[in-house]
Image (spheres, rainbow, N blue to C red):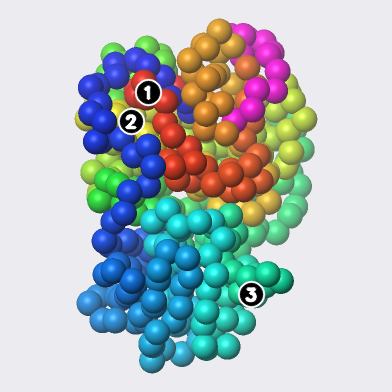
Amino acid sequence: MSTPTSAATPAITPDATPDAVKPFARFRSFAAQPDGGCESRFDGARLTVSRDGATLASFAFDGGTLRLRESTLDDDALARATLAALDACFAHGTPRALPVQLEARGCERALLERGALVRDAARGTVALAEMLWQLPELWMAPTPGAYPLRYALTAGRRHPLRPPKPGGVVYARHIPWLGRTLTLRAATLEQDLPLLHRWMNDPDVAYFWQEEGDEARHRAYLQGLLDDPHMLPLIAAFDDQPFGYFEVYWARENRIAPFYDAQDHDRGWHVLIGEPAFRGKSFLTAWFPAIQHYQFLDDARTQRIVGEPRADHARQIANLDKAGFSKIKEFDFPHKRAMLVMLLRERFFGEHLLLPAANPAPASASTPGA
C-alpha cells in the first residue's frame, strides 16, 4: 500500500501547493476515452463544451446553477456534454450539490438514470459530486461492466474469479492546478522494465522497497506480477512522462487477508515515485486521491481500500489519516509490526476527498516508495 513519507522531500513553494481549488479557464473530461475527450472552457458566466475545436453545447454557469443555453446535439450526445460540464464545475470548486436546468427532457432522463442527476424536493434537479465522481466513463476507457461473480480457490483462499487484466491506459484525470493530465496504464515487460530497473535501484526507493538488483531480478519480479491474477502493475505519468509505479491488488488473495475479515472486492496498493522531480506536494495532491479513485471506479463492488504501514511509522499513519484512512488495529506480519488502515468508499466520495480543498496534503509530502 502507499503512503506519503518524509524521505528526500524537495523544497516546496506555497504557490505550488493547492490548499484549495483555484479558478481555471479550461478543463478536460473523458481523458481516457479513445476519441480524445471533451474540453470545457469558462468565460465569465458562460461554460462551453467542445471537442476537436467544435462546440458541442454551451451553458450558463454562475457558480450556483448550471443552465443549458444552446446545443444541436441529440439526447445521448448532449448527456455526454453535460457530464463534461458537471465534471468541470465540480473540479472548479463548486458546492457539491449543483442545481441543473436542462430543457432537453430526454437528456435529463438519461442523466437521472445514470445517477448523474437526482430529484431534490427543495431544489429540483440536482447534480451531486459524490455520485458524479462514481461514474467510470468520465475517467476510464470503456469497460464491459462488473465481471460476473464466480468463486475460485488460490492457496486455500476462496475468492471471486478476477477479470482478465486490462491493457493500455486504465484511468486518466485532468489536474487543473498542474495543467497536466495524470494517466495510469497497465505496465508491460517490454516497455517498462528499464524504468522499473532504474527506479528500484534509486537509493530513496530501495530504502523502502528493498528490491534493488540487476535487470534479470527485476524482469522476474515484474513478470511474476503480470502472471499473478490478483496483482495489477501500473505506470503513472503526467502528460505521458512516467514518474511512478503502482501495484494494485485484490486483498482477498493477498498476504494481508488472514489478518482481517477481507471482503470479496477489497483492494490495496503499493507505490514508488521514481522521478525525484515529481515528489512534491502539488503532485501528491493529484496522484494520491487518483489511485484511490481508480480502485473504487474499477469495480463498483469495491467498498474498502486497505493497507498495512509499519505500526511505528507515526508520520506515515498520520498522513493516511489525513487522506481518509482509518486506523483499525495493529498486527504482526512475519517481517514487521503493522497497522491495518482502511478507506471506505462512502467516506471517499461523501467527504469529497478527490479534491485537495477537502483533502489537503500534509506539509511534508514526498513518496519515493512505500
**Relative to 357, does residue 218 appear above or below in the rendering?**
above
N-terminal label among 3 and 1? 3
Question: Which callout, 3 or 2, points at the residue further toward the start of the chain?
Answer: 3
Magenta-colored stretch includes residue 334: yes
Residue 49 falls left or right of residue 334: left
**Is mark 1 in CB contact (under 8 Å) with mark 2?**
yes
Q: Is residue 294 above or below residue 119?
A: above
Which residue in the structure is indicated by mark 3?
124
Left or right, residue 100 beside residue 237: right
Instruction: Give the mark toward the camera: 1 or 2.
Output: 1
Residue found 71% across the figure and 46% down from its top: 160
Distance Cα–Cα, label 1 vs label 2? 8 Å
CB of mark 3 within 8 Å of CB of mark 2?
A: no
Q: Which residue is at 22% across, 77% downward?
A: 53
Q: Amino acid at mark 3?
A: Gly
Q: Is residue 304 above or below residue 327?
A: below
State which mark lies toward you, 3 or 2. Answer: 3
In the image, residue 362 lies in the stretch drawn in magenta: no
In the rendered image, is residue 39 in sight? no
- Residue drawn at point x = 58 percent, y = 44 percent: 351
In front: label 3 or label 1: 3
Question: Which of 84/335 is in front?
Answer: 84
N-terminal label among 1 and 2: 2
Give the residue at mark 1: 363
Amino acid carrying mark 2 in the image: Lys
Q: Position of residue 331 (x, y in %)?
A: 69, 13
Q: If the image is split into quadrants, where does the C terminus sit?
A: top left
Marks 3/2: CA–CA distance: 39 Å
Residue 314 drawn at (x, y percent): 52, 12
Q: CA distance from mark 3 to mark 1?
A: 41 Å
Q: Which residue is mark 2?
A: 281
Residue interval drawn in magenta: 325-338
